Image (cartoon, rainbow, N blue to C red):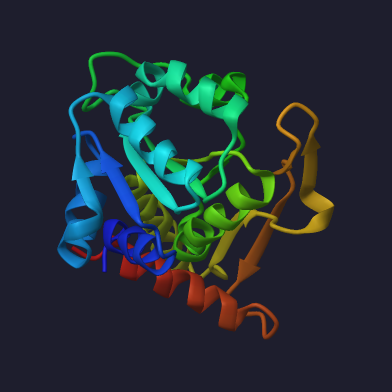
Amino acid sequence: APLSKVIAEALLDSKAAFCSHVPGYGGTEVFRDYREIAPEKAQQFFHEEVAYTASHGAGLVGCRSACLIKTHGFAKATNSILSSLSTGTLGGVVILAFDDVEGSHSDSIFDAEAFIRGAGIPYERLSLEDAYSQTLAMFAKSETLGLPFALLVDTRQKKVLKEFGTAIVEQTNKAKNPEITFPLRNLSNSVYDKKTKTLRLGNKMGSRTFFNVAHAKKFLQTVEVASIIKEK
């Protein structure tokens, strides 16, 4: 299944009672796949602030909910988002913000991560390797903090996946030991953000090589997950 289906399945399995969406590149694909499996929980809007307010309202009464919008839409919904940080939430509320980094489907480009960080909402960047489990985990984190949580999704994922696969092929063709690098997801690479009171990944990187008994299984698992996500 492509990434959109992976995220849609995670939303379903999270037991979210409501999912709002404003049409936009990246989010529309996820919403389409989610609506196919949970049509009664999916609602489309045409104004980001209204969409997010509806999702936050579900959270206030103890229901899990999601809001699928572009990062440009996140900026438009900022007033409601800032208000929700003051009121908090009972049920997990997750904003999946799809970032059109290169502006290929937007009329402008801005540093979405800096904007989200400045808004003060707890957030993480989506990891391709852990897309399903990370999406699920965001609801629990939101409930633990009593605050909405944002998951920043880079819409260039397919380009990244192509580059990922190309690099492995090129290393193989040169008779090199194929190697992949990734951010370390462990305690030693966790940084506490005092402003949002959450843990973030630091800058430490790890690597796995194919011709290494200790790495081979996880190397192949990573490649397989990337292959599944990229499939059309």
Left or right: residue 93 compared with residue 35: right
Residue visible at 54% across and 68% down in the picture? 176
Q: Is residue 158 visible?
A: no
Q: Single out the residue that lies furthest toward the front.
A: 61
Query: In this rendering, is residue 122 above or below 46?
Result: below
Camera-nearest residue between 3 and 205: 3
Camera-nearest residue between 78 and 57: 57
Quadrant in which residue 229 is drawn? bottom left
Query: In this rendering, is residue 120 above or below 61?
Result: above
Residue visible at 50% across and 51% down in the picture? 62
Left or right: residue 62 compared with residue 85: left
**What is the x, y in percent for residue 8?**
31, 60
Left or right: residue 64 compared with residue 121: left
**What is the x, y in percent for residue 79?**
45, 16
**What is the x, y in percent for residue 83?**
52, 21
Residue visible at 36% across and 41% down in the picture? 67
Query: In this rendering, is residue 219 above or below 72?
Result: below
